[in-house]
Amino acid sequence: MTIAQFVILGTALFSIGLYGVITRRNAVLVLASVEVMLAAVNINLVAFDVYLADQLYAGQIFTLFIIAVAAAEVGIGLAIVLMIFRNRHDADVDELDLMRY
Amino acid sequence: MVPASVSTLLPILAFVAEEGGEGGHEVAVQVGNGGALAQWAWLIVAVPLVVPFLIVFFGKKLPFKGWELAAGTMGFIGAYGTALLLANAASPIATEFTLEVGRIGSFAIEWGWVVDGLSIMMYFLVGVVGFFVFVYAKGYMEGDIRFTWFFAAFTLFAGGMLVLVSAPNLIQLIVGWEMVGLASYLLIGHYWEDYANVDAGNKAFMTNKVADAALFIGAIIMALSVGSFSFADMLAVVTAQDASSPLATFGFWAGLMLFIGAMGKSAQFPFHVWLPDAMAGPTPVSALMHAATMVTAGVYLLGRIFPFYLDPAGLFGGQVRVIIMIIGGITLLFMGLLAFVQNDIKKVLAYSTVSQLGYMVAAMGAGAYTAGLFHLFTHAFFKSLLFLGAGSVIHAVHSNDMSDMGGLRKRMPYTYATFVIGTLALIGLFPFAGFWSKDEIIASLYEVGIEGSGAGWFVFALAVAGSFVTAFYMGRAVFLTFFGEYKGHAQPHESPRVMTYPLIGLAGFAALAGLLNMPGIATPFTSWLAARRVPMGDVHAQSINWGLVGLVTAMLAVGVVLAYRIFFPDRVTQAERDRFEIPVLYPLLRHKYYIDDLYMDGIVRPTMGPLASAVLWVDMWVVDGIVNGAGVVARGLATAVRWFDNRGVDGIFNGAAAATGGSGSVLRLFFTGKVQQYAALSFAGVVLLAVLFIIF
């Protein structure tokens, strides 16, 4: 297994996630796509940690942090989406342009 | 010797006290320094300089509207003056205290106070006569619209007069001289609603200014010749008979110029014109300033530098003396004559004052220091008494004109009695005050004549004739005012006690003051006045010349009898009296010898017209030109500044605002509110940065 295979996997996942974030109209799916992007980053961190044989395992520990932060982020993100849905009966991000100038 | 009390008060100023009787020259009397009483005499000057401000600022809140402060001040001066007079009588005092307040080149400008026989007499006079007049003025000025201001200005006059008489040098003398001039101007114009009064004030001020110019010139010549403004330094040169001093070269001119200054203040011919007009002021002012004290300042100046004028060797001002004597002689007779035709009772007294001042000046010119100043002393009492009596009458009949009076003898008994005492003192009836002082002057003039001076005989004749003139016009005034039928319209009544008591007090002095100097019998006044730091060396009669007394008494008897014949009611009717006009003399007197007209048409109008035109021209073309030019320049500058402001400063601000607004309207197009677009743009940015990172 070469590092290139992990990098390609990470890039592919990141691209899929980015595509999902930009194109999905449902807020729940956008959040899910963000999770895919974070997974790509995690794969990248673990792969390079092993490849560089870091004595402190910084990449792997950092990955754990990212997983924890991602969980918290999904919790808050879903709560916000839920509130929006309750108020508007819709969760289409194209319609959510309250922050316009 | 530094008195501890004063030096602690004025620690910064170098304090120089000079002992009396220094210098080693022949000293006529042994004089002392007067001790603490003399050291603290500066209070006499300081108090009336402070009190006017207190009166102006707080007077109206006081129960007597400031009068109590003014009268208290005069009471203090009178008491202090009396104390000094008694101390001087006990043992002669002649000392002076000076503090240097500035310096011009080698000339020290000093402030100080002289305590010697002459200045003590003046302190006493200003205080005592002033106190009587101030008490009287409370009644006279009651209900006046500017009651408080009147007393402030009047007290300021006392302050100025005391600055003048306490002066140890010409500078301080001139300061006091101008202060009394200012007070005179303010008080003559007290009723300024009437333009005539303002005019009279201006006339007094301007006439005095002409003479003051000569006074300044004299002071400058004197200071440059002696090297000091101090009287003591000047008299030291005179006493030393130093013929090599520049004062010997310029003495005549210095003396003449100083005398012309004295002529202005003492209303001597031809500067007399202001004094009769000055009667426009309230009567107490006429009594204290224009009879008793201020107008005697000129005589006082002659007395202060008397040895300079006496000058028997003729080194210094000796040649001026004959001029002084002749001016005095002319004034005493011809100004007295003008009183014959005046109907205003105050103007009669005013011309009488001018005439009596002429006697004093003639005495100084004759070298009779004591006689001249003794007449100043007695005259202050009886003339202020006469003025206050006239004021009492005016107060009762509401008119100055004697044709509105008459028959007041019964209605105003106190005023009548005191006025008659004043009259007898003025005309010089034995044994009233004027007899002793005037007789001494006439005796001195007689002695000058005996010594072979033609001018002496001339002035002697004028003075003897003057006693007839005095008796005549005073007799006329008394008969017209107090006898016959009352011709006025108001209801006359005796004045309140606040006015009659000062009359009685002054009448006492007018009757008895002459006894202070009876030649050959008792002459305490002579030794009081002789308390000076240099010998005066004056001539005065050692005994009474009974022949002269007889001559003068005969003259005044003729005057009174003639006045009785003509003016006593019912002897001659008014119609006959009106027809009794001596062809040339009457119009001449009526028009005051045309001197006022001469000044008005000869000097004032020809000067004033072109001067006014010139001033108008300067005002229109120069002053207005400068002002308008400045306006045009300012407007041009303002236009430029406005352009810069509108285009430059505003341009920068507006440009900055427009740039911000424009960029904002472009940039806000990016903020669509679509989260995914933001995310895409962020990613695009990251990619761009990555690409740049890889390339560079």
Image (cartoon, coloured by chain):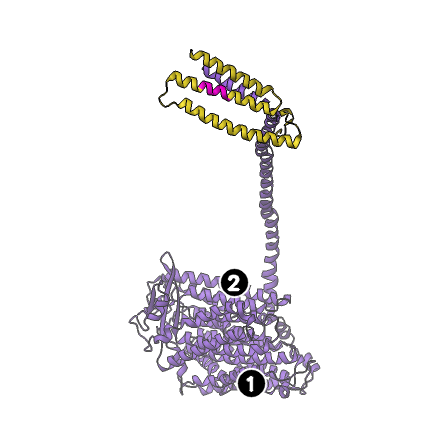
For residue B66, above or below residue B467: above
Determine whether the residue tagged by mark 2 lies in a helix, strand or loop: helix
Q: Which residue is mark 2?
A: B210
- Chain in yellow on the image: A
Residue drawn at point x = 62 percent, y = 79 percent: B395
Rendering coords of residue B140 (x, y %): 59, 77
| Residue B500: in magenta span | no
Give the alpha-carbon distance from disc 2 to disc 1, as whole Å. Answer: 38 Å
Rendering coords of residue B428 (x, y %): 51, 84
Magenta-drawn segment:
A38-44
* Residue B359 visible to an observer of this rendering: no
Q: Chain of mark 1?
A: B
Could you tell whether B555 is left or right of A44 in the image? right
- Chain in purple on the image: B
Rendering coords of residue B433 (x, y %): 49, 84
Which picture quadrant has residue B665? Answer: top right
Which quadrant holds the N terminus of chain B? bottom left
Determine whether the residue tagged by mark 1 lies in a helix, strand or loop: helix
**Secondary structure of the magenta portion, mostly?**
helix
Q: Which mark is residue B192?
A: none
Rendering coords of residue B594 (x, y %): 61, 68
Could you tell whether B251 is left or right of A99 in the image? left
Q: Which residue is mark 1?
A: B418
Q: Nearer the viewer, residue B368 or B212?
A: B212
Q: Amino acid at mark 2?
A: Val
Q: Are marks 2 and 1 in contact (CB under 8 Å)?
A: no
Q: Amino acid at mark 1?
A: Thr
Q: Nearer the viewer, residue B552 or B263?
A: B263
